[in-house]
Image (cartoon, grey):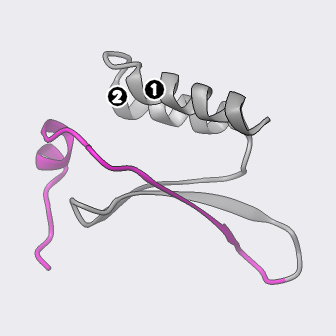
């Protein structure tokens, strides 16, 4: 798989966003979130915690404040689960 430039990553819209929760050390409870774009083949970010606000801020940053659809979907899904 070839490397993609930062410019290419920023111009192509992300259609699918994976959010994976992983433990940095097994049995210690220190989890992080890994955000990736599987169709593009790269990791977008590794968030330091599982807090909702951290995830929301990251999604807003990815969308550069222009497209709130991903955030609205996240909020809708969270309301159904809680």
Residue that extends furthest to the bottom in the rendered view of this protein: 26
Q: Residue at x 25, y 66 (%)?
A: 41
Q: Nearer the viewer, residue 75 or 60?
A: 75
On residue 63, the disc is 2
Left or right of 61 in this view: 8: left
Residue that extends furthest to the front in the rendered view of this protein: 80
Element type where label 1 sits in the image: helix
> Residue 71, position in %: x, y?
50, 26
Left or right of 71 in this view: 8: left
Q: How far apart are the alpha carbons under marks 2 and 1?
A: 5 Å
Element type where label 2 sits in the image: helix
Q: State yes or no: discs 2 and 1 in contact (Cβ < 8 Å).
A: yes
Image quadrant holding the C terminus, namely top right
Image quadrant holding the N terminus, namely bottom left
Give, as a single range, the part of the protein colored magenta: 1-26
On residue 60, the disc is 1
- Does 21 appear in magenta? yes
> Residue 57, position in %: x, y?
56, 29
> Residue 22, position in %: x, y?
66, 70
Q: Nearer the viewer, residue 73 or 59?
A: 73
């Amino acid at each position: 798989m070839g490397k993609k430039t930062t410019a290419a990553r920023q111009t192509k819209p992300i259609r699918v966003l994976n959010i994976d929760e992983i433990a940095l050390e097994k049995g210690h409870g220190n989890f992080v979130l890994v955000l990736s774009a599987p169709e593009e083949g790269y990791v977008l970010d590794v968030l330091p915690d599982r807090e909702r606000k951290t995830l929301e801020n990251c999604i807003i940053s990815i969308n550069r404040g222009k497209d709130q659809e991903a955030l609205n979907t996240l909020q809708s899904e969270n309301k159904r689960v809680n």
